[in-house]
Image: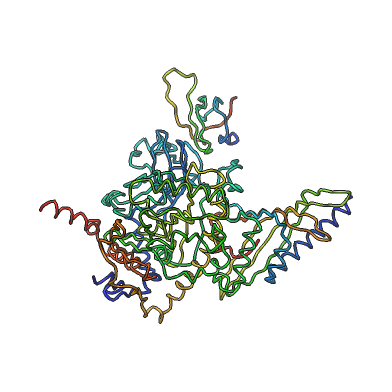
Amino acid sequence: MKHDHLLLSLEIAQFLYTEAELLDERRHDEWLALLAEDIRYWMPMRRNVKYGDTTREFTRETEDINWFDEGKDTLTRRVRQIQTGIHWAEEPQSRITHMVSNVQLLQVTHDDGIPREVIAKSRFLIYRNRVETETDLLVGKREDTLRRSGDSWLIARRKIILDQNVLLTKNLTFFF
Amino acid sequence: MSGYRAGMVDLASGLISREIFVNEEIYAAEQERVFARSWLFIGHESQIPNPGDFFSSRMGEESVILCRDRAGSVHVFLNSCRHRGMKVCRYDDGNTTVFTCPYHGWSYGTDGRLAGVPFFREAYHSELDRAKYGLVEVAQLCCYKGTVWANWDAAAPPFLEYLGEFRRFLDLILDGWDGREGQAELIGGVQKWLIPCNWKWPAENFSGDTYHNISHRSVDLVGAGPSGRSRRDYSELNVARRLHVALPDRGHQTITYMLPKDHQPQPAYQNSPEVAEYFRHCEAERRKRPGINSRMIGAPGEIFPNIALLPRQPRTLAVWHPVSAHQTEVWRFFFVDRDAPQAVKNFLRDYYIRYSGPAGMTEQDDMENWNYAHAASRGTIARRYPYTYEMGMGHAVENYEWDGLQMPGRVVDLTKAMASEEPMRNLYRRWAQFMEAESWDALMPWRQTARARAAE
Amino acid sequence: MSDPVNIRTLPVGTRVVLNSGAEVEIVSNPGDGVWLFGRYLPAADDDAEEMIFAQDVVAVRS
């Protein structure tokens, strides 16, 4: 049982590395193909709150203003915007590296003994360099719901927890 | 007018020096001359509904606390202990009975009164005059249709006088979509982010840059708007008179759209039949109301110095907080009608986030331009070449009227002209006045006019 | 010298002992870990609330 769990963790990690590769290589259409049609992609904003006030640290999905809180239609439009070649905030395109680590499986749902859905947590360090010397370093966590699709997986839900209050990058033209 | 510092803002020729964006002495002077005596946007009463509620805000570079005291009164305080300066509030918002300084324990009530001083009897021998050391409070405060504004200068005119005829444009963002007064509430969550440019780049852009559509062509191409096309709905805008309105005495200016009399609502928000019908109904109701706003459609505008309004698509207010000559912290607030159906609020929230802010497909390209225009302005050679703000000089008119509706101030009809830089000239005229004026006496020419008329 | 007491979450009604030996009943707790509002015991009907500084609290009685 433990052996299977370790193998699945490795498989999920490899999937996340493949996804990072697509983004870093600017293969955005192939990246979109990894997203389920009903994906929810959410990055809350964070507040400084009093010790113990756990309910108000994050803005709420589908209720408050967030950094991202959208589905595949908007994500696709973002990709198409970059692909126009005249999205000046991404023209010339940024150089970007996604480092993904600390991949842990929080929950595995089986069907007929086969893992069908996984909730995976990971950490990211995104290094973005732009034009001449503009550099951003963004660090945080992701909580993903992944759904088996053939031999691979689709991202059905991504919650991105960025460790910032005031956003320290001028824009979010890239994907987490 | 010779313009601030002999020619830096030369409105006779329409040339403005790059120095105003990059010069650090000018930036430092702005903190006194502009931000210490202008009306600044603090927040909205929907953020502090109950006694003890607070929201940490900003005025210029400084942290302030917006709060409601036990009796229900609204206050704005400098977020700094009177003893040794530590912030007495380091939370974004919440509810409290006291603001306590972690350094030496001084504690203030939500009315700003100094309540707790450790060892007052022993160390201070009961001699400290506590009444002198309450939290520093703004000189003037105004709550207008839920928005809270504050001014450090007691000599400044009251807020509505400061706004003057621009009030109708602020009303466009605060009144209901159906024309009922003051229906706006904030959606929870204030976007805050840092951009690498002087605050005046976004301020002049939102004053009414009608020339920069090419920046946003990529959004128009992918159709991020609420009807799946372009970035907003244009059916109504295309039949309206598109205007620049600039109030020279006040330094506020805006793009605006004036509808023909008896014009009927046009299709909008086509991505959702429910939302489309809601707005069709609101627009029909609005037209039944008396008053000019039934014929106005909101567009980007700027309240001097650093508050940007966008009443429609999206409905948002931004404050460009100065951090340094080369950096600005933007705070973005988003509005809906408080009694709009949840489906409408949800639809709009989705649209707002993908339009504005750092993840906003439209705002991203604006910021890129401001970023690199600012950087380019810093060079030794570059600074020798002033910027041309000459577009449409001399072509604004006063007493503009069309189809029975009048506009105040100096107006440029853009329906044919396409673009003008009248709003920018207006903004910098006022900025130069603030930089030169020793006091508010020199900044209120309308009072002298009124006195002269009264004397006649 | 007694161990310090964290007053931040002490409920209303708790009795604390001050370094003067006096006993105080908490009337309200602002939750800042620095101050309490309390009444000295034994209390008279018209006793005003006093502000009690954290450093003066040496023990929690109940």
**Is residue B65 something that shows in the picture?**
no
Q: Position of residue B266 (x, y in %)?
A: 47, 55
- In the drawing, does residue A89 fall left or right of residue A148? left
**Is residue B285 something that shows in the picture?**
yes
- In the drawing, does residue B420 fall left or right of residue A20? left
Query: Is residue A174 depicted above or below C35 in this figure?
Result: below
Q: Position of residue B456 (x, y in %)?
A: 10, 53
Give the quadrant of residue A19. bottom right
Q: Quadrant of the C terminus of chain A?
A: bottom right
Q: How many marks?
A: 0
Q: Residue at x 72, y 62 (%)?
A: A100
Residue farthest bottom in this picture: B381
Query: Is residue A77 depicted above or below B109 in this figure?
Result: below
Q: Position of residue C59 (x, y in %)?
A: 58, 30
Q: Between residues B365 and A49, which one lies in front from this camera angle?
A: B365
Residue farthest left in this picture: B456
Q: Residue at x 43, y 75 (%)?
A: B378
Q: Between residues A12 and C33, which one lies in front from this camera angle?
A: A12
Q: Between residues B437 and B403, which one lies in front from this camera angle?
A: B403
Q: Between residues B257 and B384, which one lies in front from this camera angle?
A: B257
Q: Position of residue B119 (x, y in %)?
A: 43, 36
